[in-house]
């Protein structure tokens, strides 16, 4: 009976492990998976109020979770509005698109798909208006700098030819 020395078995195991590790892609290592880095952090938010001259204020905390693969959002409308919500965003490598799911304290559930292009992140979904007609909804992150950015909630009832801004929010990074 042949008996290999223990060191030979260890060397064989180690070389096999190294070869497998080099072949297995690291999760969330695609360059596109870093495209939402600009959003990660703690933010103070400002938006136009219901009446002229008024402003609404809220907060948003964005962080990487689950080994950095997921971008998690925790939104609060503060004293300005009762809306509280969360989203999770992930870059789907197979589809080559960003996907986001939003849920809130009003029972809202939305699914978005999109991409980062020309300095803007745009995620969109199809929805139904109160009269039952199809509308497109989207979120646009733009004017991105290290300390601030603009976000807007927009709607199109003509298949995306024109967009109406329904809720613009200005983000300012907390110090």
Image (cartoon, helix red, strand yellow):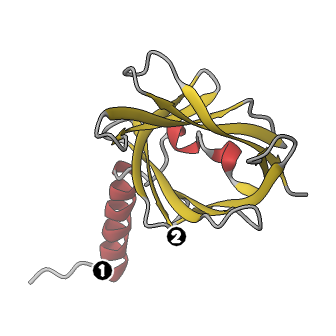
Q: Element at badge 1?
A: loop
- Residue 39 on image: x %, y %: 68, 47
130 sits to left or right of 74: left
Q: Nearer the viewer, residue 120 or 77?
A: 77
Residue visible at 31% across and 67% down? 12
- Residue 42 on image: x %, y %: 76, 59
Q: Element at badge 2?
A: loop
Residue visible at 53% across and 38% down? 31
Splitting the image into 4 quarters, where does residue 91 fall? top left
Splitting the image into 4 quarters, where does residue 80 fall? bottom right
**Residue at numbered disc 1:** 5
- Residue 125 on image: x %, y %: 39, 39
65 sits to left or right of 119: left
Asked whether the viewer can see residue 69, the reply is no
Q: Nearer the viewer, residue 89 or 155?
A: 155
Residue visible at 41% across and 26% down? 157
- How many badges with numbers are in the image? 2
5 sits to left or right of 111: left
Q: Which mark is residue 120?
A: none
Q: Is label 1 or label 2 in front? A: 2
Q: Nearer the viewer, residue 171 or 81?
A: 81
Lower position in the chain sequence, tag 1 or tag 2: 1
In the picture, which quadrant includes the N terminus? bottom left
* 97 to 159, vertically: above or below: below
* 47 to 44, vertically: above or below: above
- For the residues labelled 1 and 2, the Cα–Cα distance comes to 64 Å
Cβ atoms at labels 1 and 2 below 8 Å apart:
no
Within 10 Å of disc 1 (Cα), the crowding (few <14, some 14-19, many 20+) is few
**Residue at numbered disc 2:** 105
Asked whether the viewer can see residue 74, the reply is yes
In the picture, which quadrant includes the C terminus? bottom right
- Residue 16 on image: x %, y %: 31, 62
């Amino acid at each position: 009976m042949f008996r290999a020395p223990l060191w030979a078995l260890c060397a064989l195991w180690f070389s096999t492990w190294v070869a497998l590790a080099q072949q297995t892609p690291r999760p969330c290592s695609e360059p596109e998976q870093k495209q939402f880095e600009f959003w990660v952090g703690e933010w103070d938010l400002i938006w136009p109020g219901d009446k002229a001259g008024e402003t609404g204020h809220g907060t948003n905390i964005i962080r990487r979770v689950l080994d950095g693969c997921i971008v998690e959002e925790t939104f609060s409308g503060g004293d300005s509005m009762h809306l509280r919500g969360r989203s999770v965003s992930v870059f789907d490598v197979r589809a080559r698109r960003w996907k986001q799911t939003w849920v809130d304290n009003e029972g809202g559930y939305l699914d978005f798909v999109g991409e980062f292009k020309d300095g803007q992140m745009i995620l969109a979904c199809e929805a139904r208006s109160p009269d039952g007609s199809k509308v497109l909804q989207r979120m646009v992150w733009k004017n991105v700098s290290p300390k601030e950015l603009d976000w807007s909630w927009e709607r199109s009832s003509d298949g995306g030819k024109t967009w109406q801004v329904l809720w613009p929010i200005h983000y300012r990074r907390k110090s």
